[in-house]
Image (spheres, rainbow, N blue to C red):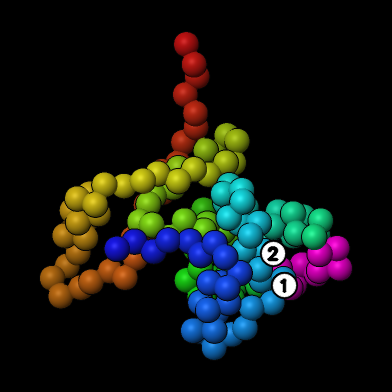
């Protein structure tokens, strides 16, 4: 069964508590920002968005909260070569398409049988805890 995003403050608090952490207003607002607009923002973009609700929050606090959310398996850190880390709340198995022209990133659902085939190519005796597939390119011109 694929993990589903936690959508209530109580559920978020429970997930954090399970990891030995407590929920804070900063963590709640940052997680909510990631859920509302699923565009794989960078920490700087998250910082700009949360300042509306938390004007005194620091960029360091945003980084710390994002790291906590990643460690608690609430969001995924997504990296594209030398670019800044981006954050994705989609916990279902999926791939990413990174548009090199616009810089946007899109989730791509993958069929379960495809993930099984990808896992089957591992060397004998190995098991992957995660698989990351990233497509890179640009949008095709419309005719």
Q: Secondary structure at mark 1?
A: helix
In the rendered structure, which segment of residues is drawn in magenta? 54-62
x then y, percent, for residue 50: 75, 59
For the residues labelled 1 and 2, say whether their Cβ atoms are less than 8 Å apart.
yes
Can residue 86 be seen? no
Q: Residue furthest left?
A: 124
x then y, percent, for residue 45: 70, 54
Q: Quadrant of residue 10?
A: bottom right
Density class for disc 1 (Cα within 10 Å; few <14, some 14-19, many ≥20) is: few
Q: Residue at x 77, y 67 (%)?
A: 59
Q: Residue at x 58, y 55 (%)?
A: 35
Q: Residue furthest bottom?
A: 20
List the residue tagged with mark 2. 29
List the residue tagged with mark 1. 25
Does 61 appear in magenta? yes
Q: Quadrant of residue 82?
A: bottom right
Question: Residue 43 shows which numbered tag?
Answer: none
Q: Quadrant of residue 13?
A: bottom right
Q: Residue at x 19, y 50 (%)?
A: 113
Relative horizontal placement of residue 88, taking residue 34 as reference (left or right): left
Relative height, residue 19 to residue 138 (above, below): below
Relative horizontal placement of residue 104, taking residue 58 as reference (left or right): left
* Residue closest to the eye, 42 or 73: 73
x then y, percent, for residue 93: 35, 56
């Amino acid at each position: 069964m694929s993990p589903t995003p936690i959508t209530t403050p109580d559920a978020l608090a429970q997930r954090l508590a399970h990891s030995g952490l407590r929920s804070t207003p900063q963590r709640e607002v940052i997680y909510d920002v990631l859920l509302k607009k699923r565009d794989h923002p960078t920490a700087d973009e998250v910082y700009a968005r949360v300042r509306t609700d938390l004007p005194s929050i620091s960029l360091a606090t945003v980084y710390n909260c994002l790291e906590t959310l990643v460690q608690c398996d609430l969001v995924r850190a997504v990296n594209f070569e030398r670019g800044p880390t981006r954050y994705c709340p989609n916990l279902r198995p999926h791939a990413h398409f990174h548009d090199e022209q616009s810089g946007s990133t899109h989730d791509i659902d993958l069929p379960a049988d495809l993930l099984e085939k990808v896992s089957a190519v591992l060397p004998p005796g190995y098991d992957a805890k995660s698989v990351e597939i990233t497509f890179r390119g640009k949008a095709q011109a419309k005719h």
